[in-house]
Image (cartoon, rainbow, N blue to C red):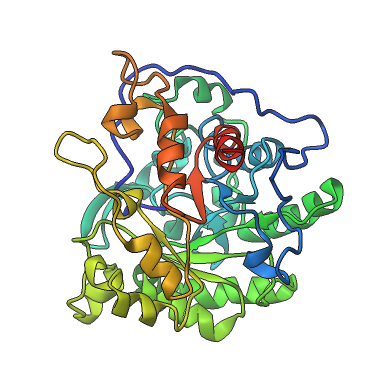
Amino acid sequence: MGTQKSDEQPGATGRRALLGAAVLGAGGAVLGLPGTARAGEDRHGGGVKSLPVPTIIGHRGASGYRPEHTLGSYQLALDLGAHIVEAGDLVPTKDGHIVCRHEPEIGGTTDVADHPEFADRKTTKLLDGVSVTGWFTEDFTLAELKTLRAIERIPANRPHNTLYNGRWEIPTFEEVLKWQDEQTRKRGRQVWIYPETKHPTYFRKLGLGLEERVAKLLRKYGKDGKNAPVILQSFEPTSIQRLNKLVGNPLVVLLSSATSRPWDFVETGDPRTVADLITPKGLKEIAGYAQGIGPTLDLVIPKDANGNLTTPTTLVADAHKAGLILHPYTMRNENPFLPAEYRKGTDADAYGDVFGAYRTYFATGIDGVFTDNPDTGLLARQDFVNG
């Protein structure tokens, strides 16, 4: 997930390097918790309805513990028991391959700055109306990107993750699809992934349309049907509409802050904001081409000026009435990312009372949640399911 998200906050210093008690054994199966169904169990005829509720989604893998969007992060998310792995945020290369990066700008997530041969690739571009300086995937061939290695994106919050800097390369989406099949065989259960098309309007104008390339790969691996274990998401509704015509996969529209406008709306002059999309009328329209929404948690429970939670909105009930599932983003263990009342101590990057926060959000009736810490999410889910 990307720059549209309102849950990205600047880091401070320090972090507790506790993995929690949910680390699994070598088998890596979903935690055998009372009242917890295994991901992939056919509870209601297959597809997304077969997933446990609430669903725990490993945000960019297990990015609380490993550099995000690496096979190491994805693998750990499965080992910790995530029901779905968000693998990955999809961006194209110069030669038309699809790779997994948080953003097309890779200065913050790879060691590209340490490669003198690519120094002249550093540039400034206008990305969805924002001036961004760095190195961009669309200016590199896949072979060139494969010479780079991933690094921790928010080292100020997660200095312990820098231990793994340089260990993993940038995965392609095709490699992820192969990895998914391999892990499904090894674990004896269906592994689910939840990729996102990033900045699709931006890339389409560059002649690097994402949707057709993604659909081609899904068809190649037989993962383009309505019950396929691949949920596709995007912040741009027209990207989801385009995918709806190309594949049968479950589709989710991501929603940022209420006052924001999807970039495809900006480009086409559509005056609507996210606030318009989350009205009963807007949700009914989304349900015509998608199966779910991925709202920021603030759309489920707003915060006041001090960062404390207020009264839940009607979004969950309204979305369910429209037949949509809700997978909000993003739960993180560290204080800076939690509502003010769930922060603990004076260390800005210590772990707060994240279990209390999960309990409050689960109580709204959400169908699942993205989390950087799948083990913590599963323990919170256990508490919630067991009352």
Q: Quadrant of residue 76?
A: top right
Locate the C terminus and report the quarter of the image it occupies. top right
Whether residue 235 is visible here, answered yes or no, is: no
Furthest-bottom residue in view?
245
**Of residues 273 and 61, which is closer to you in this image?**
273
**Residue name at image x 36 percent, y 69 percent:** 318
Total numbered circles: 0
Q: Position of residue 75 (x, y in %)?
A: 68, 40
Furthest-front residue in view?
387
**Of residues 65 and 41, which is closer to you in this image?**
41
Q: Position of residue 38 (x, y in %)?
A: 74, 50
Q: Relative to 310, is 289 above or below?
A: below
**Residue name at image x 41 percent, y 54 percent:** 104
**Residue name at image x 36 percent, y 75 percent:** 283
**Of residues 218 and 257, which is closer to you in this image?**
257
Q: Position of residue 83 (x, y in %)?
A: 65, 49
Q: Quadrant of residue 350?
A: top left
Whether residue 372 is visible here, answered yes or no, is: yes
Q: Quadrant of residue 22?
A: top right
Furthest-left residue in view?
305
Q: Position of residue 248 (x, y in %)?
A: 62, 80
**In the displayed structure, does residue 64 sit left or right of residue 322?**
right
**Of residues 212 and 241, which is closer to you in this image?**
241
**In the displayed structure, does residue 160 sit left or right of residue 261?**
right
**Residue name at image x 43 percent, y 18 percent:** 15
**In the displayed structure, does residue 219 sit left or right of residue 247?**
right
**In the displayed structure, does residue 156 sit left or right of residue 10?**
right
